[in-house]
Image (cartoon, helix red, strand yellow):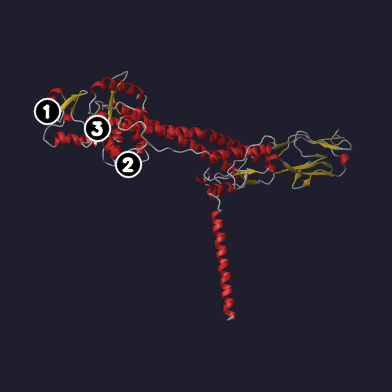
């Protein structure tokens, strides 16, 4: 019985030990340094630190560069949508392009604001990092300096205030020391933690910084000696290390000459001590180290760098998504862009100006007319035409035909917008549901328009209106016109088009009229 109790006690003790081990392991894993901090801790010598600081600076500049690149891309997309919006006479498509243009305008503004907010702290950090890298390079050269003997040692009597009571003095003035050429290997060999992709601001809490001894001090070993009879030493030739009567050479510790006096000075570098320093005031704090101005050159410089990098680490530079990636579901009553649908419906008079929510059914009916019913309607009928359908405009020279995306990238974007603005003003009085004349019919990709043409022409055996090239033939097409229209086809904007308006027949006439009267918002 006693043995059984003893065995049970041992098992219990072993179990508790195992549990304690698991707890320690779990804590260790939970407190593991992030990748960015492991990279900072791996920069243990000046060469590794120079590599680290340069790559961190590159990383920060890369963030700003990607933000600016995205801003330019969003700006170009907004211009494309503006061209499509202003050149489109079709009521429902104009609304659709207007909504997309509104989203693109906001996305562009968001990206610009994000860049503006992050630019100052990030730029300041790159400057401080570059200065620290340059300082470390200089320190590395000076700490590893070597003697450069060019002066002539001279035997004499005492030197006032230096060797004032000495009988004999060997003077060597103007001795120089040559800065070393640092032989750093980039990237550092065998340091996976210092990979360029691991040196980031993400979760960074520490920065490698040299110790004060390494930054503020230069040291040397000095050996003073005399050999033979001091009074019998003599001045020697330039470049020799000490005063001697003959052969003033120094090789492997051997002093040349029978009589000699002097000192051997050997520069000795401080140990290249680098230590990770916290960017924050304490381990559990998120408050950045504050720069000092009265703690001495070392601490003042150190706190300035830590503060700048900390502020950059806390700055957020968001890469804003493109309006061209929006889906139809995004604009529904529960979608992320429902506010744009709400604004458009208010602008059409379909909702009260004080409305804060959209009726789900009304919103879907509205979007069905504006964009269509397919999930891919926005991409197929609004985005793809930006690079497929050619817009015809005239500026200083002859008429030009280009896709919206190409016009936006060219120097003609402003001319094209001015042309379409004038054209839209001219056509306002006779605005119809037809496509803008400037759109190349051969490039047409609006699936709803194609379906409508089939319904009013192709499926009944009569000609498709858009295929007819002259007004007489266009107006002579026989068939049953859309209710409220006198003819099947009409000559609109110098182009033969179907006289019907593409609307969902479940919508009431008030909404239809609102769409046709849309000018902009």
Local packing at callout 3 (Cα closer than 10 Å; few below 14, some 14-19, many 20+) is: few
**CB-based contact (under 8 Å), mark 2 and mark 3:** no
Q: Is residue 102 left or right of residue 455?
A: right
Residue 142 drawn at (x, y percent): 67, 39
The mark found on residue 31 in the picture is none
Question: How far apart are labels 2 and 3 at the CA level?
Answer: 27 Å
Placement of the N terminus among the 4 image quadrants: bottom right
Q: Would you identify the image quadrant in which residue 361 lies?
A: top left
Foreground disc of the pair 2, 3: 2
The answer to whether residue 125 is visible is: yes
Q: Nearer the viewer, residue 123 or 252?
A: 123
Judging by the rendered image, the residue that carries numbered circle 1 is 477
Foreground disc of the pair 1, 2: 2
Judging by the rendered image, the residue that carries numbered circle 3 is 443
Judging by the rendered image, the residue that carries numbered circle 2 is 329
Residue 40 drawn at (x, y percent): 58, 46
Question: How far apart are labels 3 and 1 at the CA level?
Answer: 24 Å
Residue 31 drawn at (x, y percent): 56, 53
Residue 21 drawn at (x, y percent): 57, 63
Foreground disc of the pair 3, 1: 1
Local packing at callout 1 (Cα closer than 10 Å; few below 14, some 14-19, many 20+) is: some
Local packing at callout 2 (Cα closer than 10 Å; few below 14, some 14-19, many 20+) is: some
| Mark closer to the chain start, 2 or 3 | 2
Placement of the C terminus among the 4 image quadrants: top left
**CB-based contact (under 8 Å), mark 3 and mark 1:** no
**CB-based contact (under 8 Å), mark 1 and mark 2:** no
| Mark closer to the chain start, 1 or 2 | 2
Q: Would you identify the image quadrant in which residue 204 lies?
A: top right
Placement of 42 over or under 93, stated as above or below: below
Q: Would you identify the image quadrant in which residue 9 lies?
A: bottom right
Question: How far apart are labels 1 and 2 at the CA level?
Answer: 39 Å
């Amino acid at each position: 019985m006693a043995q059984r109790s003893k065995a049970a006690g041992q098992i219990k003790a072993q179990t508790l030990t195992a549990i304690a081990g698991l707890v320690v392991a779990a804590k260790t894993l939970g407190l593991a340094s992030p990748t960015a901090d492991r990279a900072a801790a791996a920069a243990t010598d000046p060469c590794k630190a120079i590599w680290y600081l340069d790559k961190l600076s590159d990383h920060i500049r890369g963030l700003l560069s990607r933000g600016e690149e995205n801003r330019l891309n969003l700006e170009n997309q907004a211009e494309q949508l503006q061209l499509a919006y202003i050149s489109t006479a079709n009521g429902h498509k104009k609304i659709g392009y207007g909504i997309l243009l509104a989203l693109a305008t906001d996305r562009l503004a968001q990206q610009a604001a994000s860049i503006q907010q992050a630019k100052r702290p990030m730029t300041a950090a790159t400057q401080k990092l570059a200065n620290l890298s340059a300082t470390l390079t200089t320190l590395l050269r000076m700490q590893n300096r070597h003697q450069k003997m060019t002066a002539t040692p001279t035997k004499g009597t005492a030197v006032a205030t230096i060797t004032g009571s000495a009988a004999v003095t060997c003077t060597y003035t103007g001795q120089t020391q040559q800065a070393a050429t640092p032989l750093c290997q980039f990237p550092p060999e065998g340091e996976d933690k210092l990979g360029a992709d691991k040196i980031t601001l993400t979760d960074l809490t520490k920065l490698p910084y040299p110790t004060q001894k390494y930054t503020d001090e230069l040291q040397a070993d000095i050996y003073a000696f005399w050999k033979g009879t001091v009074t019998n030493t003599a001045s020697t030739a330039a470049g020799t290390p000490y005063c001697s009567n003959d052969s003033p050479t120094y090789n492997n510790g051997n002093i040349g000459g029978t009589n000699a006096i002097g000192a051997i000075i050997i520069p000795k570098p401080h140990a290249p001590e680098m230590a990770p320093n916290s960017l924050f005031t304490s381990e559990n704090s998120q408050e950045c180290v504050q720069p000092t101005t009265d703690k001495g050159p070392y601490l003042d410089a150190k706190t300035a760098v830590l503060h700048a990098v900390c502020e950059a680490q806390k700055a957020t530079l968001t890469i804003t998504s493109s309006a061209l990636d929006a889906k139809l579901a995004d604009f529904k009553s529960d979608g992320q862009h429902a506010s744009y649908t709400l604004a458009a419906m208010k602008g059409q008079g379909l909702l009260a100006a004080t409305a804060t929510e959209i009726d789900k059914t009304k919103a879907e009916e509205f979007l069905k007319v504006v964009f269509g019913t397919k999930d891919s309607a926005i991409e197929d009928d609004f985005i793809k035409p930006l690079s497929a359908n050619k817009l015809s405009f005239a500026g200083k020279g002859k008429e030009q035909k280009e896709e919206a995306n190409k016009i936006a990238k060219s120097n003609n974007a402003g001319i094209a917008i001015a042309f379409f603005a004038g054209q839209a003003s001219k056509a306002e009085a006779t605005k119809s549901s037809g496509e803008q004349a400037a759109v190349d019919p051969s490039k047409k990709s609006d699936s709803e328009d194609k379906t409508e043409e089939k319904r009013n022409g192709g499926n009944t055996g009569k000609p498709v209106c858009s295929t007819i090239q002259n007004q007489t033939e266009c107006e002579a097409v026989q068939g049953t016109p859309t209710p409220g229209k006198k003819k099947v086809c009409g000559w609109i904007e110098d182009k033969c088009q179907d006289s019907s308006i593409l609307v969902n027949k479940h919508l009431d006439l008030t909404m239809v009229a609102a769409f046709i009267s849309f000018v902009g918002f």
